[in-house]
Amino acid sequence: MRSFIAIELPLAIRSALAELQQELKMCNADIRWVKPDNIHMTLKFLGEVKEDRIDGIVNGIRDVCGRYGRLRLEVRGLGVFPNRRSPRVLWVDVTGDGMLAGLQRDIEGAMALEGFKKEKRGYTPHLTMGRFRSLREKDHLFERIDQLSDNSLGVMDVK
């Protein structure tokens, strides 16, 4: 089964993301939008996982998470990967204290012990809102992103 380790979002954040998507859809950019119920913050993508490996994965996650207390994260700001000239992914930024980077790094290490490859790219906490299908109306979308880029969509506590 296709698997990943992620932080699930509270309902208030999901609702704010749904409202933001509705606003951005008015720009008529050619984007395949992620359903708000499917938006999450990935900590580690695992890929295809056989069922007999799940116990080891869960134990590794439990061990790592047991070393962390509560994380306070804010969902704020918009951007695109890899850049505005060739956008592929529209995302919302997630910021917080340095504990999030440590948690992700420790999960990465625990999953390496379970035989999963380490990610070569640096970790950028974000929520994927949609994927560009073409560049149609991207300038209009970017104008709106610039106007909304400092709006907070909420704060969440992760335990």
Image (cartoon, rainbow, N blue to C red):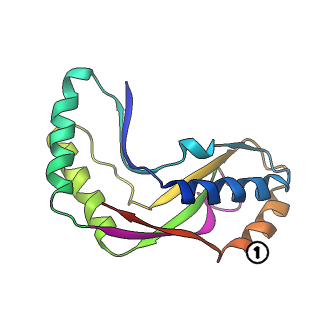
Rendering quarter of residue 123: bottom left
Toward the front, the furthest residue is 11
**Few, some or many C-alpha atoms within 10 Å of disc 1 (few <14, some 14-19, many ≥20)?**
few
Q: Residue at x 14, y 51 (%)?
A: 63
Q: How many marks?
A: 1
Q: In the image, is residue 79 part of the stretch drawn in magenta?
A: yes
Q: Is residue 99 left or right of residue 31?
A: left
Residue at 24%, 52% (x, y): give it.
Answer: 107
Q: Secondary structure at mark 1?
A: helix
Q: Which residues are magenta?
A: 70-87
Report if residue 86 is visible in the image.
no
- Residue 151 appears anywhere in the view: yes
Amino acid type, mark 1: Gln
For residue 116, which quarter of the picture?
top left
Give the main secondary structure, helix, strand or loop, of the magenta stretch: strand
Q: Quadrant of the N terminus?
A: top left
Residue drawn at the location 62% of the way across and 55% of the way down = 15
Apparent side of residue 70 relative to residue 29 in the rendered image (left or right): left
Residue 37 x/y as whole percent: 57, 43
User: Is 8 in the magenta?
Assistant: no
Q: Give the quarter of the figure containing the C terminus.
A: bottom left
Percent across and percent down for residue 125 are 44, 61
Q: Is residue 148 left or right of residue 44?
A: right
Between 73 and 106, the one lying in front of the other is 73
- Whether residue 38 sits left or right of residue 31 in the image: it is left
- In the image, residue 105 lies at what x, y percent? 26, 59
Q: Position of residue 45 (x, y in %)?
A: 37, 42
In the image, residue 149 sits, relative to residue 39, either above or below, namely below
Q: Which residue is tagged 1?
A: 147
Q: Is residue 63 above or below residue 32?
A: below
